[in-house]
Image (cartoon, grey):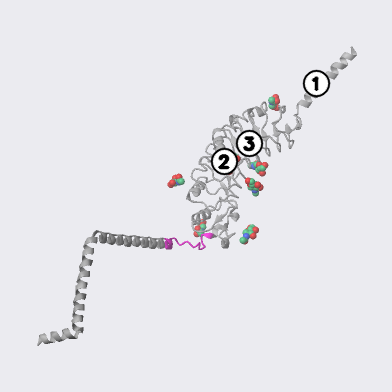
Amino acid sequence: MLNQGLRVVLLALVYALSVHASSCPPRCECSEAAQTVKCVSKDLQNIPTGIPGYTKNLFITGNQIDRIGPESFRGLENVTTLSLSNNRIFEVESHTFSSLRNLRSLDMSSNQLTLIHPEAFTVQSRVLRELNLSRALYNHSSVTDLTTALRWSTLGGLQVLDLSSNSLIYLPPRIFSHLGSLRRLQLANNSLVAIYNDTFTGLEHLEELDLTLNALKTFQEEGLRELEHLPRTQLLLGENPYTCTCGIESFATWLNGSQSRVGDMEHVVCAFPADLRNTSLLTVGELALGCHRAGEGDNLALQTSYVFLGIVLGFVGLMFLFVLYLNRKGIKKRIYDMRDACREVWEGYHYRYEIDSDPRLSQVSTSADI
Ligand SMILES: *[C@@H]1O[C@H](CO)[C@@H](O)[C@H](O)[C@H]1NC(C)=O
Ligand SMILES: *[C@@H]1O[C@H](CO)[C@@H](O)[C@H](O)[C@H]1NC(C)=O
Ligand SMILES: *[C@@H]1O[C@H](CO)[C@@H](O)[C@H](O)[C@H]1NC(C)=O
Ligand SMILES: *[C@@H]1O[C@H](CO)[C@@H](O)[C@H](O)[C@H]1NC(C)=O
Ligand SMILES: *[C@@H]1O[C@H](CO)[C@@H](O)[C@H](O)[C@H]1NC(C)=O
Ligand SMILES: *[C@@H]1O[C@H](CO)[C@@H](O)[C@H](O)[C@H]1NC(C)=O
Ligand SMILES: *[C@@H]1O[C@H](CO)[C@@H](O)[C@H](O)[C@H]1NC(C)=O
């Protein structure tokens, strides 16, 4: 009797222990009080199963996870903050995060995304507020997938998007057009060379735009117009290789009129040419950039007129040759005539000379004269 009771107690204890053990996945640390689970730098290949339902903050960082899909986060309805940074994730399937109905912040920084399915970031009822894709794209080619995903995933509630350090060369038009609630957009440390039409379309509520550490040499009219479409946005534009030569005047003038909107004006300086390095773009307007537009125009006009003159002369020459060609028979005849005439004259002269120089003939002639 006692024996059996002991066994039951033991069994219950073992059961309780096993339940307790299974309530936190192996190689993870779980804190029910803090509603937090951390699986950090444990060489995990997959998202572990058995993550407790109370979890609000889930950190699976610094592992070897390479793909995630809808089965990865089943039953984790209470998670609000999810970090998957520093993994090797290259594929995110559609609806991967759909079961995370309260997800507000998703950090996927430092991954190698190559395959982003169209509805990869879809979360129900637009609760996602923050998406960190810093250093997350494998290379610039992933921007096409990303553009589709940003449009197809229901991200109407997104307020912060970090796309820094992604080697982005350009941004497709309307890439952010479905992110109407966005407040902060991080594009720092990419390789953007210009801002084109419709790049920032749809960002009516943007408060901060960071374009530092890119490859911008200037802003053309198109780019300036895009910035003008964001009148309430604080801009960070420093640490770009601005080239202070002809053509940068309109940007410099725009800067002068937009000083209150640029948060890092002291870093908006010329990188080239060498003698203007570190010169503020605000002072460039007053400097001679060596581009006298009127003079340039004159020069161009002069060159054009020279070219025109050359063409006219060439044409006249061609016409002359053509006329010569058409008259070749007449000319030949005339040359022959001329030659004959010359010959006659010559022969006449020669004949005369011979007569003159022959004493007998001269005698004959003189005698005949007499
Ligand atoms: C989520 O949290 C609520 C309230 O804290 C709790 O009642 C519910 O069981 C949790 N969900 C899961 C799947 O554990
Ligand atoms: C995104 O992640 C990077 C690296 O983990 C971090 O430095 C950055 O501050 C994060 N961005 C935001 C907006 O929190
Ligand atoms: C990006 O990587 C893929 C796969 O390695 C490659 O095919 C593609 O050419 C790369 N694109 C760029 C812009 O480097
Ligand atoms: C810029 O991005 C590269 C990778 O693209 C990274 O190695 C570097 O640390 C980043 N620099 C800054 C200042 O964030
Ligand atoms: C950009 O927009 C302006 C005005 O809307 C237009 O004149 C210009 O042709 C556009 N540029 C391109 C490359 O489409
Ligand atoms: C430009 O300024 C930076 C820091 O403000 C400084 O490190 C650098 O030496 C300066 N370069 C020149 C050419 O003055
Ligand atoms: C800069 O703007 C001020 C007025 O805000 C104006 O007086 C000044 O001439 C402008 N300077 C240049 C170089 O455009």
**Mark 3 or 2, nearer chain start:** 3
Write the residue at 53% across / 60% down.
Answer: 284
In contact (CB < 8 Å): disc 1 and disc 3? no
Crowd band around label 1 with a 10 angstrom C-alpha radius: few (<14), some (14–19), many (20+):
few
Chief secondary structure of the magenta portion: loop
**Mark 1 or 3, nearer chain start:** 1
| Along the viewing direction, whichever of 349 and 172 lies nearer the viewer | 349
Magenta stretch contains residue 345: no
Res 275 seen here: yes
The quadrant in which the C terminus is found is bottom left
Quadrant of the displayed image that contains ligand 1: top right
The residue to which callout 2 is attached is 141
Crowd band around label 3 with a 10 angstrom C-alpha radius: few (<14), some (14–19), many (20+):
some
**Ligand 3 lies under 8 Å from the Cβ of mark 2:** yes
Residue 117 picture location, percent across and down: 58, 33
Q: Secondary structure at mark 3?
A: loop
Tell whether 312 sits left or right of 102.
Answer: left
Q: Which mark is residue 15?
A: 1
Tell whether 217 sits left or right of 5.
Answer: left
**Ligand 3 lies under 8 Å from the Cβ of mark 3:** no
In contact (CB < 8 Å): disc 2 and disc 1? no
| Along the viewing direction, whichever of 104 and 151 lies nearer the viewer | 151
Distance CA(mark 3)–CA(mark 2)? 13 Å
